[in-house]
Image (spheres, rainbow, N blue to C red):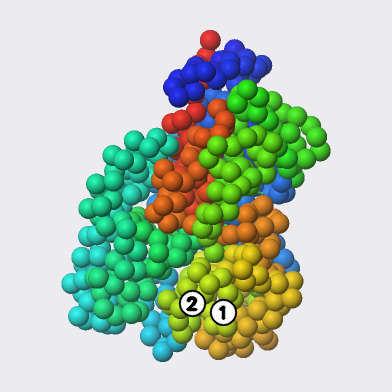
Amino acid sequence: MTRLEHIPPHADMPRVRGPGGPHAIVIGAGLGGLAGAMRLGAKGYRVTVIDRLDVPGGRGSSITRDGHRFDLGPTIVTVPQVFKELWAACGRDFHAEVDLRQMDPFYEIRWPDGSTFTARQDTDAMRAEVARLSPGDLKGYDKFLRDAETRYWFGFEDLGRRSMHRLWDLVKVLPTFAWLRADRSVYAHAARRVRDERLRMALSFHPLFIGGDPFHVTSMYALVSHLEKEFGVHYAMGGVAAMADAMSGVIEDQGGAMMMQTEVDEILIKDNVARGVRLAGGRVLNADVVVSNADAGHTYDRLLRNHPRRRWTAARLRRKRWSMGLFVWYFGTAGTADKWAGVGHHTILNGPRYKGLVKDIFIKGRLADDMSLYVHRPSVTDPSVAPEGGDTFYALSPVPHLGVDNPVDWQAEAEPYRRKVQAVLERELLPGLGDHLTASEVFTPETFRDRYLSPHGAGFSIEPRILQSAWFRPHNVSEEARGLFLVGAGTHPGAGLPGVISSAEVLAQLVPEPVMS
Ligand SMILES: Cc1cc2nc3c(=O)[nH]c(=O)nc-3n(C[C@H](O)[C@H](O)[C@H](O)COP(=O)(O)OP(=O)(O)OC[C@H]3O[C@@H](n4cnc5c(N)ncnc54)[C@H](O)[C@@H]3O)c2cc1C
């Protein structure tokens, strides 16, 4: 028999001795939810993961159309050690279960004037790229890399891997934030180090991959340049969905259960303690611990709708700045394996504007005529994603989330916008694309709203601005009820694979330790 050992701050949590050990319910099988379930399983909890989708992985799941397998979301795996440590905490070997391949080059950035920047791990190769674009910026680039390393040790290894739910945790680090000029935006920081606008973009765009406006999110995110250089950029063979499958396998080996195609309607709270969940069909499942990997906004606004909330009220959630929406066109091609030789696994295709476009997306909330695209072509690395001789792609365009001020009617706009994306690709990257198209599928912010129950159809939950990060973000241990915990993009430390895997590490520090008796 096992029981919960009660440690602060949950000393008053009720003891429930269910058969087979204390029961933890994890709502959501996103990467954060799966990692949280693995951590709780390793601690000795009996875990049930519940997700409304038919496959695990959330935004990191995949779909197959006409023989093309599309990774729906994350494609770039950084900081692989967070996965290695997660597997090790479960007594397993990550590399024995997931085939991770190092990318070289990491990605290519292209501008409309024909200039390019190829990002690699090797510092000399990177310096040569900087010198090719702007020889006068070499010194500044070296400084930027040193800045990035300092911010990595503080922002990722320290703050990102521990709970920030006590105000004191924040107060203690304020002097370091001030010293590192965390109030400055990542673009402003890059602009202090290099003069060339293309280099400024190349050193500052990374927050867009976790839903942040580079002209407003904190310069702490410069740390991404360091973690890419230090630990590389990787691809998981079979896509991130293969990682999600491997994680589900670990959970089941631990004795946990995966309940797919099952929606949670409400988290049940009694005497201010989470006691379980009610499913959409009305069935009630009891639990000693409830972990929500659903978006923090959905968790509080919908799943806790009948519980009076002190901090995360509907009004406060409405006032938050949400990350941008995403328009993603997944498409397959036939007879192209030998075509477009210069187009690698990851390409960033800049449109004519950087600052203006970001402002349209994040501040004005208007769908611009121009666009910048991230283009994923996994078939150059992983032949399993496409039928022989063909290619599998996606093209991602950041767009406004579903706002009230300038609503985009995606029912009407999706196809014309897709055609615009195709025209840009044919002109700039993939000439003749239209003659080779096979499979085609489009996700708009409305798909994100309906598929992932993402508030405002946002791609990455609450935007990672400084006053929406760390203590200011919904905490990993809920402020609203005891026995309720949060993992995933909307909680600390934030979106992106390293972020959500780290949120599960923080979760494991907070959830009471079950002891065998
Ligand atoms: C297009 C795209 C590209 C990206 N590229 C990268 C990248 O290259 N590298 C990187 O590191 N990051 C990338 N990201 C970010 C990263 O994918 C996400 O931050 C991360 O996967 C989010 O994980 P999560 O744990 O928050 O859960 P999510 O993936 O949001 O999953 C939450 C799950 O909860 C389920 N759910 C919600 N409500 C309920 C309910 N009531 N009942 C049952 N189930 C429910 C949903 O169905 C979903 O499966 C990308 C994201 C997107 C969208």
Seen at 75% across and 37% down, the residue is 279
In the picture, measured across the screen, residue 208 lies left or right of residue 277, that is: left
Number of labelled discs? 2
Residue at numbered disc 2: 357
Question: Percent x, y for residue 339?
Answer: 56, 83
| Vertical side of 407 occupied by 282: above or below | above
Mark 2, ligand 1, within 8 Å: the answer is no
In the picture, measured across the screen, residue 166 lies left or right of residue 485, that is: left
In the picture, measured across the screen, residue 333 lies left or right of residue 142, that is: right
Residue type indicated by callout 1:
Ala
- Judge the density around disc 1: few (<14), some (14-19), many (≥20) Cα neighbours within 10 Å: some
Q: Which numbered disc flags the more N-terminal residue, 1 or 2?
A: 2
Is disc 1 placed on a helix, strand or loop?
Answer: loop
| Vertical side of 387 occupied by 267: above or below | above
The answer to whether the residue labelled 1 contacts the one labelled 2, judged by CB atoms less than 8 Å apart, is yes
C-alpha span from label 1 to label 2: 7 Å
Seen at 69% across and 25% down, the residue is 286
Question: Percent x, y for residue 170?
Answer: 34, 41
Residue at numbered disc 1: 368
Quadrant of the image containing the N terminus: top right
Residue type indicated by callout 2:
Leu
Question: Percent x, y for residue 318?
Answer: 58, 53
The outermost residue toward the top is 517
Seen at 42% across and 49% down, the residue is 469
Is disc 2 placed on a helix, strand or loop?
Answer: helix
Residue 151 seen from this side: yes
Question: Percent x, y for residue 515?
Answer: 50, 16
| Vertical side of 487 occupied by 125: above or below | below
Closer to the camera, 114 or 269? 269
Res. 379 image quadrant: bottom right
